[in-house]
Image: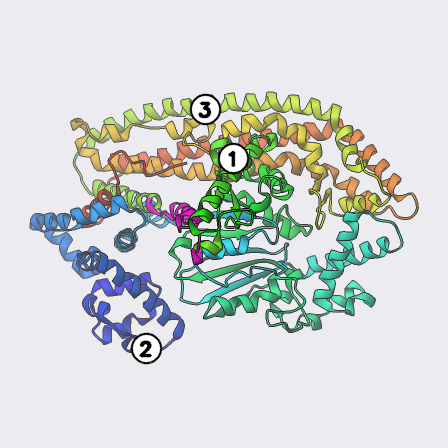
Amino acid sequence: MDGFVRNKLTEWDLSKWIKIFEEHGIDAESLHCLDDEEIVDLIPTVGPRSRLKMSLKLLKEQNRANPETVNSSAQVCPSTSDTSDKAKNIQKGKRKSDLQDESSQCQSPTRKQRLANKPGSYSEEIILSDVKNIMRYVHQKIPPQDNKLNKFLKKKISDLKTDKREVVGVFGKTGAGKSSLINAVIGVKNLLPSGDVSACTSVMIKVEANMQNSKYEANIEFITKEEWKDELWFSKNFLGDNADQKSDQKVDDDSRDIVEKLSALYGEDWKNKSPDDLINDRYFKEIPEFLFSKGKILTVETAKELSAKLVRYTRSDTKDEEGKDVKRWYWPLVKCVTIKVPNKDLLKHVTLVDLPGNGDRNKSRDKMWKTLVGSCSTVWIVTDMNRAASEPEPWEILESASSFMGNGGQCQHIHFICTKSDHIENSEDHSAAGARAFILKTNDRAKKEVRGEFSKLKEVKKHFSDESFKVFTVSSKEFLKRKRLDKDDTEIPKLQEFLQGLNDRHSETLNYVSGARGILSLIQGASRREGADTKTAVYTVLQQKMRVELDKVRKPMKETYQAFEKCLSEGVEKSKSSCEKALKSVIHPNKSGSGFHMTLKCIVQHDGTYKPKKKGRQINLNMKLSSYLTESIDEEFKKTFPNEGKCGPFNGVLNAFSLDTKMMKEKTKYKDVELQLIFLNTEEEQIKAKLNNTIRERKKTIYSSLTTTIETNMQKCYDDAKKIKGPGMLSDVRETMVKHVLGLKNVMFQKAKAVMLKQLDDLMSDILDYLEKTMQKSIELSLKTDGVSIPDVTSELVMVKNHYKELQGSPDEEPLIW
């Protein structure tokens, strides 16, 4: 058995079977020749066997596309004894020609051309795998002595990461064609139910690739038992209070929604029982996972089987697909379902999320909704082609979620997707050519109308530019059958191409290999004894550069803080003068009817928010009260923390930070420390990338802090209002709320300003502190520490360097991006 097989089994999480493969004499060549029967003999367990078969299939496809990778893959990460012998020979000066051979082998023009033209290709996967194996091996080679440099190197290797997942949020009302669209884009029939079925709008559904085995899987996450008990108490009280009183249409819809939810889970049992009775374990015998706050996992062979099993957890029908009555439906208890699809490279690093329109009444589901929306890099708004521009619901979804996606999130692309574009009812020419011409003309008109509608959305335009908005007219039916339209006319391939771009791992693989190259350069540089004077000189130069560069970052940050302080001060004054008007717009709406008392009760019961079941936008009193504050900083916030473009946060000053180590290593006088400068250059890029990710996450909290601070200050008001009952409840609740807001207006908005500025100041301080300390530590360990016990990594460095060159599409390509 050779090192290649051992490394592959370890990489595929099959190290348990290394000994068996060793006993059967499986080497790199015979590994590629294993058939199904032989694999069963080697690995009798189904799960690991499936993983091996899938991994081997991938490996064979790689080798068919590029036969020379069989040898190069086998040689990239040698066994321990082999590499040790190489190192000894290199130290004796006997391996120069061998290294040149390895270099030329790794730098095959055919491979380089293919990698440059097709980032994220199978060959790139091989390179990433090989470099990971090399770094695991180097990690083992570093001596266990407890000194600063060894500990630093081990940590740097452990911190090399490539994991990243792009999230695409999919919005749209039931019947808009979301399920058919997702099924068509990922190329799996019957995965998500489509057609005339009743999808449950509260359940979030994630769809991603199954990289572990060839099964279809679903991981069902439930709300907690305590949360369900709270919902039961609210539901019973709501229905009781609403039974003998007049209500508006929205409240009647909510009553029907509650009845539907309770009947789905309990049948008729809920009507005469208390919430304590309904939380009894006997109702949840089929889902013990719910009782123990665990996820339920379903595993099947086909998409159709999975869809049939999921129906009770994701749909609100009273019958299953075969028309059988189902006694108990569990969708009211479900928070999120993650569906994993096998053999879908398109979803390897992309997650599609089917999302409800504007959050949820359940706090746990609403929190997850906000987190998922805030993590979307792209959002698809799906609507029926027939009324694409005039249908109010998709635009309401976009407006209500824009702040969570924009300044409060990381969304860069909004795709407005008009489905069912194949309709030709009004066409006079029903020939194939005539139908196609009619459809394409209608599509163009719809796109213009939708773009025109988008240009009117002032609130959305605060967060997104016209460049970020694109319109697609798609037909899932024509994509599959192609009766009237060509494949490209359906525009499904455009969406697939976009997802493939998100799925593209090129920059991340390059980042990993670049980081590995830097670490190996430091190890090799530290093992040299010469150049002490040069190290001292470079150390002095870098210290001076560090002070200058930090000042370049510090000054604009100070100006940013001052700009925010000015904006927020204006926002505070406007909030003070307008808060009563903002409050009364919620608690005294311009509407007729006497049923508003139940809507107001829902608002206070849910701490300031109310989500109608069907018609109307979500009411959020906390956001309404903080709206003047958020409006005051929206423009400055978008400029400081842009989601679009390449400038980066704080007007690009962080991305511009540079110690010029890349230029220094080109100078002859610094040749003795060239390897250390390579490390410092990659380290600088890695630090900036990490800080950019940190900023991206923390800016969401900073933006939402205005509303969360208002909610905290309003909590006593909501708690007091919840206790008010009986005749005159409506006027008493209103009076309580007005009194509370007016009493706190001189404190509440000022506090929200202070909290945001404190969080902003903390972020800026942490950026400067991390940048200075981490860079300083790297400089000192690179130039002021001798690697007394550092291993020789010459061969490993040569191989990783050549992989790095292969991955670079061009010499000017930037490996790290904001």
Identity of the residue drawn at 81% across and 38% down: 591
What secondary structure characterizes most of the magenta part? helix
Q: Is residue 804 magenta?
A: no
Where, by quadrant of the figure, is residue 739 drawn?
Answer: top right
Three-letter code, disc 3:
Arg
Q: Look at the picture and state if 70 lies above or below 248.
A: below
Which span is picked out in magenta? 480-506
- The one of 813 and 599 positioned closer to us in this rendering: 599
- Circle 3 residues within 10 Å: few <14, some 14–19, many ≥20: some
Kindly give the residue lying farthest to the front in the view shown: 428
| Residues marked 3 and 1 touching at CB (< 8 Å) | no
Q: To which residue does mark 1 refer?
A: 448
Marking on residue 554: 3
- The one of 557 and 48 positioned closer to us in this rendering: 48
Give the percent coordinates (x, y) of residue 815. 32, 39
| Residues marked 3 and 2 touching at CB (< 8 Å) | no
What element does badge 3 sit on? helix
Give the percent coordinates (x, y) of residue 455. 56, 30
Give the percent coordinates (x, y) of residue 1. 20, 69
Quick check: can you spot residue 491?
no
Marking on residue 506: none
Identity of the residue drawn at 44% across and 49% down: 490
Identity of the residue drawn at 86% across and 56% down: 243
Q: Is residue 491 magenta?
A: yes
Quick check: can you spot residue 613?
yes
Q: Look at the picture and state if 69 lies above or below 620.
A: below
What element does badge 1 sit on? helix
Q: Earlier in the sequence, mark 2 or mark 1?
A: 2
Label 2, label 1: how many angstroms apart (C-alpha)?
58 Å
Q: To which residue does mark 2 refer?
A: 40
